[in-house]
């Protein structure tokens, strides 16, 4: 039920306007509950009982849309917050409904985010399993001059079926300076010394080259053959260690 003085005042004013407009004078007497309501068209004043006021509140509440109820709750938070603590108030009851809906929405969003993260993690795991090779070992260390980085690594088979389709022949080593391609040994080992004085991290991947073809012809750029490097492993990252 509404107990807000502002709401009751609005209801009373509505009746006052209606009475003044129609020019009606109402006198109602009830022997059962002793409720009396009177109206005077002359002064436009209407007096109603608490029971009738509660009935009007309930009728008004039931006629309100969900959006109007929501706005009424928001208004009560600043205008008449006492109603939100009264467990018999319609505002209190609806406010509890809004709180439950908000909590359910938040929980649903949290579950959706967790599900999406789990799916992403599973996809990454499955993709890692599908790679033909993997970088099993990788070390990166500065030289005595601190101008170069010595990189050593090893590639080994990760998925035998896919490894039979394409053999890894090169390792692509990456620093902030860019890429450097190193041919793999028969055992899958590779090493390189790269000029990168400010390098903090090093990455390595395995793969192979193919010539770019267009209309059955080899593509050239500035007189040089254009190649495409096909990755056969996930990237492995290590921090560059200081020289000792």
Image (cartoon, helix red, strand yellow):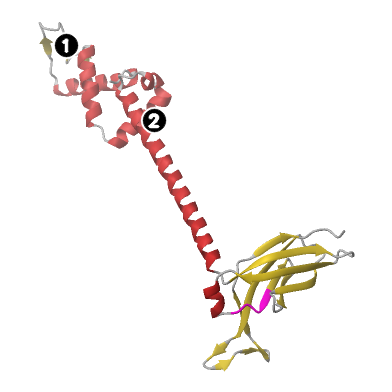
Residue 215's place in the image compared with 184, above or below, is below
- The magenta-colored residue range is 167-171
Q: Nearer the viewer, residue 15 or 2?
A: 2
Residue 58's place in the image compared with 155, above or below, is above
Q: Which mark is residue 38?
A: 1
Instruction: Report x, y in % for residue 112.
Output: 43, 48
Structural crowding at the residue carrying mark 1, measured as other residues with C-alpha within 10 Å and reported as few (<14), some (14–19) or many (≥20): few
Residue 83's place in the image compared with 104, above or below, is above
> Of the residues under marks 1 and 2, which one precedes in the sequence?
1
Q: Kindly tell me whether residue 36 is visible in this rendering.
A: yes
Tell me what residue is drawn at x 54 percent, y 65 percent. 129
Name the quadrant of the C terminus: bottom right
Residue 149 in the figure: left or right of residue 170: right
Q: Nearer the viewer, residue 198 or 124?
A: 124
Q: Quadrant of residue 133?
A: bottom right
Q: Kindly tell me whether residue 228 is visible in this rendering.
A: no
Residue 196 in the figure: left or right of residue 126: right
Residue 111 in the figure: left or right of residue 226: left
Q: Which mark is residue 74?
A: 2
Q: Nearer the viewer, residue 114 or 95?
A: 114
Tell me what residue is drawn at x 29 percent, y 22 percent. 10
């Amino acid at each position: 039920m509404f107990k807000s003085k502002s709401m009751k005042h609005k209801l009373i004013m509505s009746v006052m306007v209606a009475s003044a407009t129609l020019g009606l004078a109402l006198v109602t007497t009830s022997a059962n509950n002793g409720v009396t309501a009177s109206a005077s068209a002359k002064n436009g004043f209407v007096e109603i009982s608490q029971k009738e006021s509660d009935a009007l509140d309930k009728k008004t509440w039931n006629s309100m849309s969900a959006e109007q109820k929501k706005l009424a709750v928001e208004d009560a938070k600043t205008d008449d917050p006492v109603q939100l603590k009264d467990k018999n108030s319609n505002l209190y009851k609806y406010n509890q409904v809004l709180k439950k809906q908000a909590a359910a929405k938040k929980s649903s969003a949290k579950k959706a985010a967790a599900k999406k993260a789990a799916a992403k993690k599973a996809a990454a795991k499955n993709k890692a399993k599908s790679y033909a090779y993997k970088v099993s070992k990788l070390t990166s260390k500065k030289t005595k001059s601190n101008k170069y980085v010595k990189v050593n690594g090893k590639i080994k088979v990760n998925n035998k079926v896919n490894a039979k389709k394409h053999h890894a022949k090169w390792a692509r080593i990456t620093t902030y300076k860019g890429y450097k391609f190193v041919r793999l040994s028969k055992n899958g080992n590779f090493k390189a010394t790269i000029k990168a004085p400010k390098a903090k991290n090093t990455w390595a991947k395995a793969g192979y080259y193919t010539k770019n073809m267009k209309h059955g012809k080899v593509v050239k750029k500035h007189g040089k053959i254009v190649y495409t490097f096909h990755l056969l492993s996930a990237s492995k990252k290590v921090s560059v260690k200081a020289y000792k």
